[in-house]
Image (cartoon, rainbow, N blue to C red):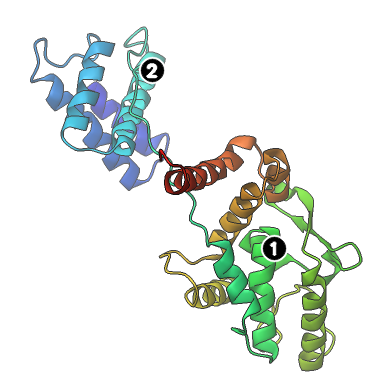
Amino acid sequence: MSHQESFIHYLKYEKRNSSHTVVAYRNDLEQFEAFCREVPGGFDVKNINRKLIREWVVYLMGKGLTPRSVRRKISSLKAFYKYLVRLEVVDAAPVFDVPLPKVRKKLPLFVEENRLNHLLDDGYFTADFPGIRDKLVIALLYGTGIRLSELLSLTGSQVDLDYCQIKVTGKRNKQRIIPFPFSMKMQIGDYLKARSEAFGTVSGPLIVTDKGDPAYEKLIYRIVHNYLAKVTLIEKRSPHVLRHTYATHLLNKGADLNAVKELLGHANLSATEVYTHTTFEKLHNIYQQAHPRG
């Protein structure tokens, strides 16, 4: 059995990787072997060096593969050589310090401030219970930046109308307190009144369906998608886009990055820094339009 087949066997029966993952590893290794056989020296796992792997990276980029695809193939090669080192087939892996093409991060989509103000202020919502609820859903997601799961689990007892703040439990059961705009205080009060009139005393989640049952993911997605479609042409119109919008607008207004990190419940600052790219891009566009030498 070749080293490659031994590695595939290891992935299948010891690591118990999915068939899709195993096929991907096999294809990547076969492509690397085929490349090596076209150069002097051929393919020998003990003689593969950093220079040859770099040449493969250049070859792959030249064939039009995206940086993400190239990095995936090199990741397969790293796993293979880690396996060979463990078996003492080779002393060291030549792949670990090979420079890789950078993957450009996708900028988060967000809705422009004036469009959301237009949606919330200019009569898009009906005065009945579904309309009052739908408006609060949009306002909460945009006004606090909470995740969909946090919205669905939010209860009335977690809403403090006196101090205009909510307490949510995020990832890793980490709790945080988030302020909400004073204007939302009356809106929440109106919702609670409409909910009580429609369904009486309701315990559990704050947001409920038209029948008084706890809201669910598809309902919130539908609400957000349908209303955002009225004011924006962006393709993705999801609850998470409103979370992106919350963070982007705060930073555009000069909010401290660390403060936004805490409000979003991010574990580290790097997750929040992606929004600075959006704000810098906005500043760049303003410069291009307004500066005499732009």
Task: Classify residue 158 as left or right of residue 13.
Answer: right
**Picture quadrant of residue 267:** top right
Residue type beneath disc 2: Phe
Determine the residue positioned at 76% across, 74% down.
Answer: 206
Residue type beneath disc 1: Gly
Task: Classify residue 288 as left or right of residue 207.
Answer: left
In front: 255, or 238? 255
Residue, far front: 292
Q: On the rendered image, what quadrant is the N terminus found in?
A: top left
In the picture of the structure, the residue carrying the numbered disc 1 is: 143
In front: 17, or 204? 204
**Picture quadrant of residue 270:** top right
First-in-chain label (2 vs 1): 2
Q: Position of residue 41 (x, y in %)?
A: 11, 10
C-alpha distance separating marks 2 and 1:
44 Å
- Badge 1 crowding class, 10 Å Cα cut-off, few under 14, some 14 to 19, many 20 or more, is many
Q: Position of residue 97 (x, y in %)?
A: 38, 15
Determine the residue positioned at 14% across, 20% down.
Answer: 36
Q: Position of residue 241 (x, y in %)?
A: 53, 60
